[in-house]
């Protein structure tokens, strides 16, 4: 019998404690090779916490995380060396130029022919004329392009993206979407966090919807719909609305008990 490839991402009973509140608990997720997995929710839903737990940027208070067979909490440096990450609201070092930063990342990852790869991605993102401009003098969109280039440059087997297209114009949003779809078609795996539902319908084969630190539903995009007439936006509003209603009812009940 052919061997079954182990999931690239596995969480078991995962949770992160903030005071008396435990976010995302109990979180049990598996992401397999070749998947485009999306996590969607309103602002403040817990998406960034989710991705930080998976990439070793935060340690879980409960449960465990394994990514590429690596314990994310125990060996975050090894994990980061083997994945690509585009964090939310992070910019390249202000004192480096795009060319210098891409060179630094390429050499840190011990890539072959770094100079050629740097020139390729500067050209791909339309940054040739900004290659020697220090990053603090670039626009938000240009800085975002550099962060994406540093994640794409080594074509990682597993790529984590947190609101990756927030500062990009429509031309580069489309261009990056196609690159990601091609990357998955060629054997890569994507884990995406966003609040833009359009991306789920266009790109994801599985997704989770979260709100207020809780996973409301997860599965194939089509399976989350009650019927063929329900759009993904309808699903999102239904689930998030129910979640808000349940929290408000709980708060009311607690107030009455006091």
Image: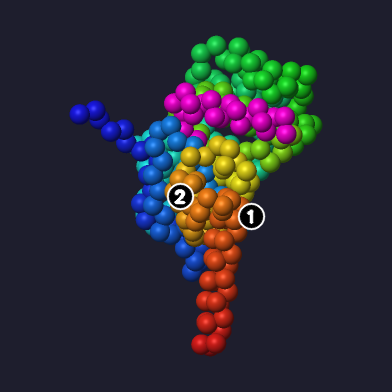
Q: Position of residue 115 (x, y in %)?
A: 61, 13
Other-residue count near label 1 (Cα within 10 Å), few / some / many at <14 / 14–19 / ≥20 = few
Displayed quadrant of residue 162: top right
Displayed quadrant of residue 3: top left
Task: Name the foreground residue: 113 vs 214.
Answer: 214
The residue carrying mark 1 is: 43
Image mark for residue 256:
none
* Distance of label 1 from label 2 (alpha carbons): 24 Å
| 236 relative to 6 in the view: left or right | right
The residue carrying mark 2 is: 223
Q: Quadrant of the N terminus?
A: top left
Q: Position of residue 72 (x, y in %)?
A: 41, 43
Displayed quadrant of residue 170: top right
Task: Name the foreground residue: 80 vs 36.
Answer: 36
For the point 53% across and 25% down, the residue is 182
For the point 72% across and 29% down, the residue is 171
């Amino acid at each position: 019998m052919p061997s079954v490839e182990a999931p690239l991402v596995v969480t078991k009973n995962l949770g992160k404690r903030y005071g008396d509140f435990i976010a995302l608990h109990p979180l049990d997720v598996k992401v397999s090779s070749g998947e485009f997995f999306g996590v969607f929710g309103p602002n403040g839903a817990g998406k960034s916490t989710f991705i930080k737990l998976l990439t070793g940027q935060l340690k879980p208070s409960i449960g465990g995380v394994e990514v590429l067979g690596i314990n994310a909490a125990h060996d975050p440096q090894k994990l980061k060396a083997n994945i690509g990450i585009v964090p939310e609201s992070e910019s390249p070092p202000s004192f480096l130029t795009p060319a210098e930063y891409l060179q630094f990342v390429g050499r840190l990852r011990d890539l072959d022919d770094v100079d050629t790869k740097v020139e390729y991605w500067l050209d791909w993102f339309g940054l040739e004329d900004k290659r020697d401009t220090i990053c603090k003098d670039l626009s938000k969109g240009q800085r975002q392009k550099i962060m994406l280039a540093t994640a794409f440059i080594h074509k990682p087997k597993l790529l984590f993206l947190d609101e990756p297209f927030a500062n990009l114009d429509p031309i580069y949003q489309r261009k990056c979407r196609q690159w990601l779809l091609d990357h998955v078609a060629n054997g890569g795996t994507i884990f995406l966090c966003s609040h833009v539902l359009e991306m789920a319908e266009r790109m994801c084969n599985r997704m989770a919807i979260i709100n207020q630190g809780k996973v409301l539903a997860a599965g194939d995009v089509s399976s989350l719909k009650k019927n063929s007439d329900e759009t993904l936006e309808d699903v999102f509003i239904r689930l998030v609305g129910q979640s808000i209603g349940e929290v408000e009812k709980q708060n009311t009940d607690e107030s009455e008990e006091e």
